[in-house]
Image (cartoon, grey):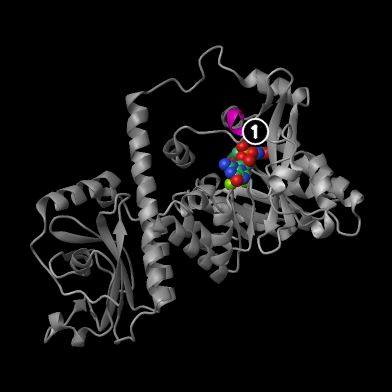
Amino acid sequence: MPQAELQTGRIDSQEEDARLSALASTGILDSDPEPNFDAITRLTAEYFKADTVLLEFADESRVWIKSYWGESVRELPRERSVFEMVLAEDGPVVVPDVSMHPHFAGVKLMIRRLEVASFAGAPIRSGDGKILGVLAVFGCQPRRGMAVVELRMLESLADIVASQLELRRMRMTLRRNRQRNARPLKPAAGTWPCKSDLRQALDKREFVLFYQPEVELSTRRIVGLEALIRWQHPERGLIPPMDFIPLAEESGLILPIGDWGLSEACSQIQKWCHEDPDQGAPRVCVNLSARQFAREGLADHVEALLRQSGVSSRQLGLEMTESSLVSDIGTAMAVLSSLRRLGVTLLIDDFGTGYSSLHHLHSLPFDVLKIDRSFVERMTRGNEQPLQIVRTIVELARVLGMEVVAEGIETQEQYGLLRQLGCRFGQGFLFSRPVTADAISEMLRLPGRILPELAETKTVPVECAVEPHQQENPEMEMATKLS
Ligand code: C2E
Ligand code: MG
Ligand code: MG
């Protein structure tokens, strides 16, 4: 394990300037305490059975504690700090026994009342690798060295902080750009579609649900389906949801559209049950928007639908993103609990892109966590960080007793890696694009409901497949979800 000699001074000033400006671009030092950071320090303390955990960021002269677990500390001198050691090492530092470390000979290391006997710290890096801070664990007893898997966990937790900082930076950039190019909220006259187009589409029953299989990764067996709406426009063809769902949300039409989607999914479940009474339908998961979630009586509405359609609650799943829950966490908890009592499965969608991932993961009663496809995509681009994040999410879900579904699996390499990481379920173009209900009926007739290799090209007629909306700027895509 690396054991750094403490080095102070001798910092390359250009490097330090770049580091400080990377830190400033996150705005982290000017922000109020945030519960998701507390969730990380708490989790770290639980995992390492640490006496104190500090999440720290360093400016020129001081180390600022953004979140602590155990001893309450607000700031420390930067000189001789764990941060300095991690910076000097340019990587994690583990000191299993402070009394044996040459630097601390005859010196007590105190964090308020805690006399530190052992500690470890992992760097929190900016997108371009600058060390902005440290996630550090402290114990009042010497400890054996740190196993590789433990050190990886500490680094992954630090990486989660890093990815949240990156999102914060994107959000600040986006906000600045928005202010700069302040444009009217409403689409310009003549922009298609407008609210009345959506209303007509609803009246004329032009919306359709496509379904994408969710598979058990070890067998490729279909275990569930995600319902994804499309607009079958008579002249313009098949319109992807990202081209009309935002307008539907803004205009409030998402409520009737969402009601239609839920009831359509329930009647389709019934049809699949009739087609195969022995095995029944796989669980169908429907996406809920923030407005649907916030509407009074959601659980009653779902209960009535289930009763009318004769569908068992086990066959229905509801997916929502973290951003649909954030406005009022108390209400979110009550609504989720009443849905859970009905027996429907609750899935947290696009996990990892929301700003308060860990906080919600800990406190809300979700059954399944869907890892956002941006992580899966970046996992195989030779960058360790997304891989670590996926590994940590899978591990945390396991600890919390949740299932994990990886979204957007497109390549054999991603498939292989996810299986190695212990992720059990997944969906993506590698298995199948979203397809019509009829195409799904055919897949459900496959022996054991097991999708063959390269199911994508064999089972999906091109005219059924719809390309997901291509965002030209993924940074904007992520940041929009957050705002
Ligand atoms: P989502 O719920 O995260 O759905 C997953 C999206 O990823 C789908 O896009 C799906 O087609 C796409 N996808 C799946 N596998 C892959 C892959 O391997 N590679 C790539 N590049 N993409 C993949 P889609 O159908 O365009 O839906 C986009 C979003 O629209 C959904 O994201 C969901 O947030 C929203 N949406 C879809 N249907 C509904 C609905 O009925 N109600 C509401 N409120 N939102 C919906
Ligand atoms: Mg979804
Ligand atoms: Mg998703």
Q: Position of residue 371 (x, y in %)?
A: 55, 54
Position of residue 9 relative to residue 434, above or below, is below
Residue depicted at 11% across the width and 87% down the height: 106
Residue depicted at 8% across the width and 62% down the height: 10
Report the residue marked by disc 1. Answer: 254
Position of residue 303 relative to residue 190, above or below, is below
Position of residue 380 relative to residue 437, above or below, is below
Q: Where, by quadrant of the figure, is residue 370 drawn?
A: bottom right
* Magenta stretch contains residue 380: no
Helix, strand or loop status at disc 1: helix
* Magenta stretch contains residue 243: yes
Secondary structure mostly seen in magenta is helix
Q: Which residues are magenta?
A: 240-244
Q: Position of residue 306 (x, y in %)?
A: 81, 49
Seen as rendered, the residue at the extreme top is 190
Position of residue 156 relative to residue 94, above or below, is above
- The quadrant the N terminus occupies is bottom left
Residue depicted at 90% across the width and 53% down the height: 276
Q: Position of residue 406 (x, y in %)?
A: 58, 55
